[in-house]
Amino acid sequence: MTVEKRNKLLLLIVIIIISLNLRPAITSVGPLIGEIRLDTGLSNTLLGLLTTLPVLAFGLFSVLTPLFTRKLGTEGTMSVALLLLTGGILMRVIPLHTTLFLGTLILGAGIALGNVLLPGIIKKQFPKKVGVLTGTYSAMFGLGAAIASGISVPLSQGADFGWRWALGVWAIASFIALLVWLPQMKKNFPVITRKSFRESLRHLGQSKLAWMVAVFVGLQSLTYYTLITWLPEILIERNMSPAEAGWMLALMQGVGVLSTFAIPAWASGRKRQRLPVFVIVIPELIALIGLMIGSLSLAWLCVTLIGFCLGGSFGLALLFIVLRSRDSNSANELSGMSQSVGYSIAATGPVIFGGLFDLAGNWLVPLVFLFLIALLKILSGWVAGNDEFV
């Protein structure tokens, strides 16, 4: 194996390790919502902020990522991202409401930077394998998310960590990711682009395609972050145990790992990606109807279908960023713009969903809201799947 191939393999391994760390800090919250409510007395709307705050940070810091890379370089910015992630996770261990929410916001900023950088790294370092590798690292997002969802309650109750340390334990993993990334700093240089930050935003803001990619990113993320927050609560109210509800959430995300890998690999070989949009949204609509019916006997099937659809739509959203851009610089710009707009949309989901439940007193109305979001996803995906560049 040549030195270049060995370095590429090591980089790919590091990317996988980082990807595994970019979701557990968020998905570990959902199964613990009941414990957090009992301990803190927070309302459902405020509890929704524990998922909404990171997504709001995604929206803000995604669009600012090019400013960081021009000063610190891609490698330096990724190091900052992992530092913020580790520090934010640890802050949530401190028994104060302020640090709980502030730490959540800080770790969200770290994840936002990592989210934006990864598509550009793939575009630059592995230009001939973007479909497979986009699927690979986005599948690692899902795997890390599934593990965190599944073991949150066992860590909190079985291992007697309590909910704060069940959330805080993920700082160890993110610190390891930082350590394995640091050797990449040897080749760190500030990113030099032809256009200013303001010019890049103005250019993308005039592109209908860029906006539809952003809306697709936002709608698929809205459904995902809403369900990782509230799905366990829906199932627990229907007499499922908290531990089993946590594992159902893990099932949703575990199934998503498969589709997150498979859908981009398949869709990247097509001239247009409109058919894949239908393949991943129609079953989602069916599954949401199943959740509205409310039978626990159908829960595992509905959760499995939703997991497949959300995983596939996430992988497809990342693939749109890569396929609709001409080079790594434009990929970073489109990634920043689409994730900023998209996650700003997504941030409203958990709070609206919790608020609708507080107003209606049942889960039917909030689930109808997600059904309408899925219909809008088809419309945005139809444009985003067209064969052209921004």
Image (spheres, rainbow, N blue to C red):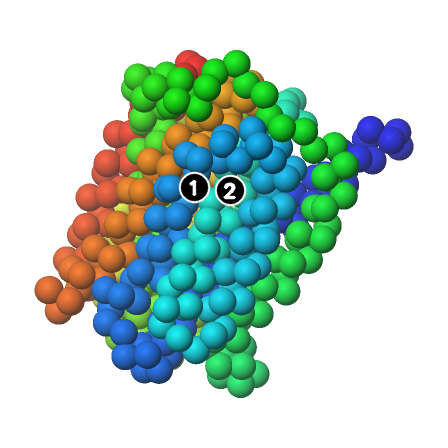
Is residue 188 placed above or below 183 in the rendered structure? above
Q: Residues within 10 Å of mark 2 (few under 14, many from 20)?
A: many
Residue at figure coordinates x 31%, y 27% from the top left: 212
Residue at figure coordinates x 30%, y 67% from the top left: 47
Is residue 53 placed above or below 7 in the rendered structure? below
Is residue 384 placed above or below 31 in the rendered structure? above
Name the element at disc 1: helix
Whether tag 1 and tag 2 are in contact, CB under 8 A, the answer is: yes
Residue type at mark 1?
Phe
Label whose residue precedes the other's in the sequence (1 or 2): 1
Give the labeled residue for mark 2: 113
Residue at figure coordinates x 38%, y 42% from the top left: 60
Q: Residue furthest left?
A: 360
Q: How many labels does the image show?
A: 2
Residue type at mark 2?
Leu
Is residue 2 placed above or below 200 in the rendered structure? below
Give the labeled residue for mark 1: 61
Q: Which of 184 and 253 is in front in this view?
A: 184
Q: Which of 219 and 67 is in front in this view?
A: 67
Q: Can residue 79 be seen in this view?
A: yes
